[in-house]
Amino acid sequence: MSLLEVATAIDSTSLSTALKSVSWIVPLVQSVHILMVGVVFVSILMTSLRLLGRVRADEPLPQVWSRFAPFFWTGLALMIVTGALLVIAEPVREFMTLSFRLKMIALAICIVSAAVFGHRMRGASLSLSQEAALPAGLRAVAIATLALWVAIIFLGRAIAYDDSVWGDWSPAVLQRVA
Amino acid sequence: MSMQTQMPPAFIHSIEASAVGEWMRSNLLAMPWVNAAHVLCVTLVFGTVLVVDLRLLGLLDRGRAVTGISREMLRLTWTAFAGAALSGLLFFSANATTYWFNTAFRFKMLAIVLAGVNMLVFQTVTFRSVASWDRGSPPRAARVAGALSILIWVSVIVLGRVIGFTKSVDVSVPENIDFDFSAGP
């Protein structure tokens, strides 16, 4: 079964039909999705900036993460639920773009990375003076994570312009030609 | 359509006719990049404002000084807001007339002004007594300002999304061109 066939099958489900039938559902779900992206992104931003020594220098790293982690995970859960609803509403539009596919890969990397980071922070009682001993690579991870989240946001918006952005690499173009 | 008989103010027309507007309409990649930058900046504005608002409501960072948090976050908020305003203006220049007559757009601008007023009142009145509640529980006026701020910024984002679904695209067909559809597709 090709991805297009999967998308077409989802498109004909009753949930998909229901989501499409009311004009204000998609904009409303998109709004909640964007709000949750804000919550998730800023939770990551604060933790990354703390790792880079730009904010909250007086607060130990594990404590900074424990403040933002509940917002990160709750925001992420709602972001995924609203995102899934948007995919169910318009599966062909999402699946048949390179932007969406790259976004999902980047998102998976970010979630795994946050889970690993959170696991390492849990129960860690790192005093401010001990932080100098943190592996230098962690700063690089912070920058890479921020870059990935920026990419996720850009790719999310690029779904609507997939063929302009990617040209012949866009599956939407191939689909149209076929 | 009644909309086409309405004329926008002259400055709206000149924004749309400007070189920037023309570039936004003609460059294939301008719209996606500006659009993505706008969303990025808007999520940053919302998220950073939320950190301060949640502190005012006592739901985040209890025990941390309000002054420290607001100083740290405001830098980020203003940078993101500048980016959002700039990318928003670029957007606007592409279809200024359409935006001008769009109800959701007007309400969004109104909501941004309200957010500014709320912030101004908070900064000039409520924040004066901050020394007495910096590390403790903020007074009712501060909590109200925080709640209002969340409400207003949520509306800004919802209205922004509604614009995308309600604005019509300006397509003008030159009058001196005859189309011949007889040949079929």
Image: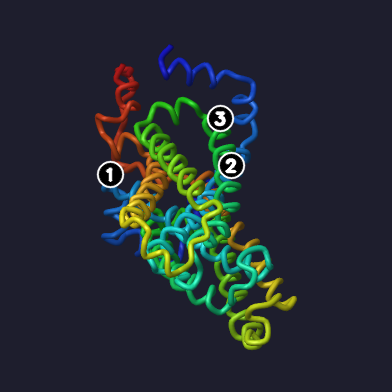
Q: Nearer the viewer, mark 2 or mark 1?
A: 2
**Residue appearing at x 59%, y 82% in the figure:** B123
Residues behind callouts 1 and 3 on a single chain: no
Q: Is residue B2 visible?
A: no
The residue carrying mark 3 is A89
- Residue reaching furthest to the right: B140
| Nearer to the camera, A168 or A100 | A100
Q: Residue B80 falls in which quadrant of the image?
A: bottom left
Residue B126: percent from the left, percent from the top?
A: 66, 83
- Residue reaching furthest to the top: A1
Type of the residue with mark 3: Ala
Q: CA distance from mark 2 to mark 1?
A: 34 Å
Q: Does residue B171 appear to the left or right of B111 in the view shown?
A: left
B132 vs B166: above or below: below
Q: CA distance from mark 3 to mark 2?
A: 18 Å
Q: Are the residues tagged 3 and 2 within 8 Å (C-beta)? A: no
Q: Residues within 10 Å of mark 3 (few under 14, many from 20)?
A: many
Residue A177: percent from the left, percent from the top?
A: 29, 20
**Residue appearing at x 45%, y 66% in the figure:** B81
The residue carrying mark 1 is B28
| Nearer to the camera, A169 or A18 | A169
Residues behind callouts 3 and 2 on a single chain: yes
A150 vs A133: above or below: above
Query: Which secondary structure, mark 3?
Result: helix
**Residue appearing at x 58%, y 33% in the figure:** A85
Q: Earlier in the sequence, mark 3 or mark 2?
A: 2
